[in-house]
Image: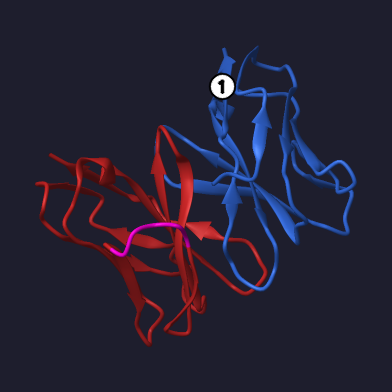
Amino acid sequence: KAGVTQTPRYLIKTRGQQVTLSCSPISGHRSVSWYQQTPGQGLQFLFEYFSETQRNKGNFPGRFSGRQFSNSRSEMNVSTLELGDSALYLCASSLAGRVAFFGQGTRLTVV
Amino acid sequence: SQQGEEDPQALSIQEGENATMNCSYKTSINNLQWYRQNSGRGLVHLILIRSNEREKHSGRLRVTLDTSKKSSSLLITASRAADTASYFCATDKGGSEKLVFGKGMKLTVNP
């Protein structure tokens, strides 16, 4: 069974640009969550999608958004990038109430 | 914001020794999970313990949960150099897949 796939693995963007990250969950998993990991703040929850609906949202500005498609694949978008958005973005998929499986992450660098 | 706090924040041991790491959390939980992360890559799930369980084993791993003290411990027995990684505890409240992570603990196992 294929694991959680995140693309791209690495990304360099300039301040003010926008970026879209993609996550393909494990087949059959309907829940997809996104996390931001930085050295200073650690792992912070961004949002969770279940059956194309955002079920939970973390404490991030509106520049961070996401969506989930009917095949459970998910994308997250960050607009008007700031230097502080440089981070490892992790996606996780799960069956309800069970183990969350994480992808390898997308390393975003904003210059 | 982090709910969990791992203790100690860093631990260095010799191969063959046991490693114990502790996690404290603040609110009631549904499940507590432990994850491992190698060098800023994706998180690998180690073990999940439910709030109505007190102890669980998986291979060289033993996790305990004390809901009255809001704490958990992870014991890795007979450690190996390959166990060198950062370890995180994560909790959920049920009803959604949102995980709240601790700050993590860096374990170094010297050969």
x, y percent for residue B9: 60, 23
Q: Residue drawn at (11%, 53%), measured in percent from left and top? A: A16
Q: Dot 1, crowdedness within 10 Å: few (<14), some or many (≥20)?
A: some
What colour do you see for chain A?
red
Q: Residue drawn at (41%, 44%), measured in percent from left and top? A: A37
Identify which residue, A1 or A63, lies in the foreground.
Answer: A63
Looking at the image, residue B71 sits to the left or right of residue A54; the answer is: right
Kind of residue indicated by mark 1:
Ala
Identify which residue, B92 or B73, lies in the foreground.
Answer: B92
Mark 1 chain: B
- What is the magenta segment's predominant secondary structure? loop
Q: Residue drawn at (78%, 56%), measured in percent from left and top? A: B28
User: Which residue position is annotated with label 1?
Assistant: B81
Magenta stretch contains residue A60: yes
Which quarter of the picture shows residue A73?
bottom left
x, y percent for residue B55: 87, 46
Q: How is the image coloured?
A: by chain
**Quadrant assignment for the C terminus of chain B:** top right
What colour do you see for chain B?
blue
Q: Which residues are magenta?
A: A58-62
Looking at the image, residue A57 sits to the left or right of residue B102; the answer is: left
